[in-house]
Amino acid sequence: MPEVLKAPLVVEFPFTRSLGPVQSAFLTGLRERVVLGVRTHDGRTLVPPVEYDPVTADELCDLVEVAPTGTVTTWAWNPAPRRGQPLGTPFAWALVRLDGADTALLHALDATGPDAVRTGMRVRVRWAEERTGAITDIACFEPYDGEGERPGGHTGAFQDPVTGIVAHARLDYSYSPGRAQAAYIKALSDRRTVGERCPSCRKVYVPPRGACPTCGVGTAEQVEVGPRGTVTTFCIVNIKATHTANLDIEVPYVYAHIALDGADLALHARIGGIPYDQVRMGLRVEPVWTEGARHPDHYRPTGEPDADYDTYKELL
């Protein structure tokens, strides 16, 4: 039985966004151990606050403090917390309607087990020891059987307000290629590039997907292409990738679409061996391999004359 290829992959990037006055006040309030909502024109208090009424689309700006105590409206038990979740031990995800609010806030509820959680139970905020102006300033909720706390009537005006946040997005997953891509990857390990030809339109697609994207029919006929090719389009990268070992490349550098000889679809790769400002459409290039690599490190000029535009214009 053929080996089933499988590899762990991670997609990760920081997302930076600025905050409007409502979200700024809400997150700054959490830093100061104050929970703020926003009052709608018909008197409802929304927590977490939003800048526009979800019912009427009216702009909202009337901030009002609510209590750090509240009631669980619904919940789900999480027996196996994942990386980056609020607690490292099993906990409940709970929707909590804080006293004074008309909507519920989603957060972690620290409890000894699912039998200790119920809809209608009373809880309160457990504040994080170090607070920076983020939703994680609420470390979690915890069961509470005391009197409901009264809000202090804060108006939402703070010194040194939080004006922006950075959210770190990450997706961990395991990738297993299908038949066509497995054959493509295996060929690369032998320093060959193979595509598949459509039995209908006769186009050769690299990398292959097992079906023609134009005709929608399955492909099976393997065709070796390249190794040389032509730069069709390209971009100059001026921002250095961080936290990514295989993209630790000094900027600026060029990433290009390359139509390999014999292929009807351009693939993308880095261009090296030439100053970035000398890369051009029609440039003829060839792969450069490094010892032990399973794919070309980059492509470099072959020294051939540039390809005529008419030979690659359909691949732009």
Image (tube, rainbow, N blue to C red):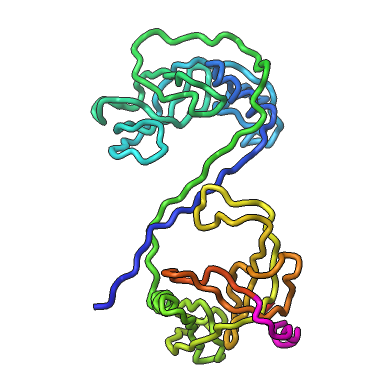
Instruction: Tell me, yes or no, if residue 44 can be seen here.
Output: no
For the point 42% across and 57% down, which residue is it?
A: 9
Residue 300: image quadrant is: bottom right
**Residue 216, position as x, y percentages in the image:** 51, 81
Front residue of this view, candidates 220 and 291: 291
Q: Is residue 178 magenta?
A: no
Front residue of this view, candidates 309 and 246: 246
For the point 75% across and 84% down, which residue is it?
A: 309
Q: Is residue 311 magenta?
A: yes
**Residue 154, position as x, y percentages in the image:** 62, 12
Q: Relative to 122, is 58 on the left or the right?
A: right
For the point 62% across and 51% down, which residue is it?
A: 240
- Quarter occupied by the N terminus: bottom left
Instruction: Tell me, yes or no, if residue 224 can be seen here.
Output: yes
Q: Relative to 236, is 36 on the left or the right?
A: left
**Main SS of the magenta segment?**
loop
Q: Which residues are magenta?
A: 301-313
Residue 73: image quadrant is: top left
**Residue 290, position as x, y percentages in the image:** 48, 69
Say above or below: 203 vs 94.
Answer: below
Say above or below: 259 vs 140.
Answer: below
Say above or below: 70 vs 240.
Answer: above
- Quarter occupied by the C terminus: bottom right
**Residue 173, position as x, y percentages in the image:** 40, 55
Q: Relative to 143, is 48 on the left or the right?
A: right
Front residue of this view, candidates 25 and 188: 188
